[in-house]
C-alpha cells in the first residue's frame, strides 16, 4: 500500500448503515502505511461538476498523466472527503497517479485542510 495508489475500498456510509466499494486515493505517508493497520484515503467520484473547486483534483484517464490511474472515466478526487479505514477494507489496487497529478492533490489537500 503506497501513497498515490488508486484503490477500491469498502467505504462505510456516514449513517453507519452499510457500505459501498468505491475508488479512493491513498494519501497517507508510506512510513505510516507500512506500520499501521489503518490508512487515510480521499474518495474519488465520477461527478466532475465541481472540478474547479480548489479542494478537488481532476483526473482524465484519457490523458498521459491520467492513463495509469486505472479509472474508467473522468473523475474528481475529493480532498474534503477523507476517510481513515482499515487496510483490510482495501480490496485491490487499480492504478497509480502520476507525480504531476499528485502535486495537484497535495495542493488540494492543503486547501481543504487550511494549510498554507
Image (tube, grey):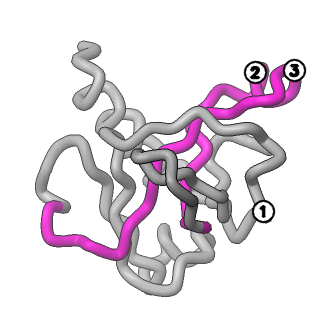
Q: Callout 3: 10 Å neighbours few (<14), some, many (20+)?
A: few
Residue 48 point in image, percent of width and height: 23, 71
Q: Nearer the viewer, residue 12 or 47?
A: 12
- Quarter of the view holding residue 31: top right
Which residue is label 2 attached to?
A: 32
User: Which residue is at 31% across, 63% downward?
Assistant: 58
Asked if residue 19 lies left or right of residue 66, the reply is: right
Disc assigned to residue 91: 1
Residue annotated with mark 3: 35
Q: Residue 41 placed where, x, y %?
A: 56, 42
Q: Residue at x 28, y 15 (%)?
A: 115
The quadrant of the image that shows the N terminus is: top right
- Whether residue 49 is in magenta: the answer is yes
**Front label number (1 vs 2):** 1
Q: Nearer the viewer, residue 53 or 60?
A: 53
Residues at marks 1 and 2, CA–CA distance in whole angstroms: 19 Å
Q: Are discs 1 and 2 less than 8 Å apart at CB?
A: no
Magenta span of residues: 21-50
Residue at 54% over, 77% down: 71
Depicted 77 relative to depicted 92: above or below: above
Q: Do callouts 2 and 3 mark residues in contact (Cβ within 8 Å)? A: yes
**Mark-to-mark CA distance, 2 and 3:** 5 Å
Q: What is the quadrant of the C terminus in the image?
A: top left
Q: Residue furthest top?
A: 116
* Helix, strand or loop under label 2: helix
Answer with mark 3 or mark 1, whichever residue precedes in sequence: 3
Amino acid at each position: 500500500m503506497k501513497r498515490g495508489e488508486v484503490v477500491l475500498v469498502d467505504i462505510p456510509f456516514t449513517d453507519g448503515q452499510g457500505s459501498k466499494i468505491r475508488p479512493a486515493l491513498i494519501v497517507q505517508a508510506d512510513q505510516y502505511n507500512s506500520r499501521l493497520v489503518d490508512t487515510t484515503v480521499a474518495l474519488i467520484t465520477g461527478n466532475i461538476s465541481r472540478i474547479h473547486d480548489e479542494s478537488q483534483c481532476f483526473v482524465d484517464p484519457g490523458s498521459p498523466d491520467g492513463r495509469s490511474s486505472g479509472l474508467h472515466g473522468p473523475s474528481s478526487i475529493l480532498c474534503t472527503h477523507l476517510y481513515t479505514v482499515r487496510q483490510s477494507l482495501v480490496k485491490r489496487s487499480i492504478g497509480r497517479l502520476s507525480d504531476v497529478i499528485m502535486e495537484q492533490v497535495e495542493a488540494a489537500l492543503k486547501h481543504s485542510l487550511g494549510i498554507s
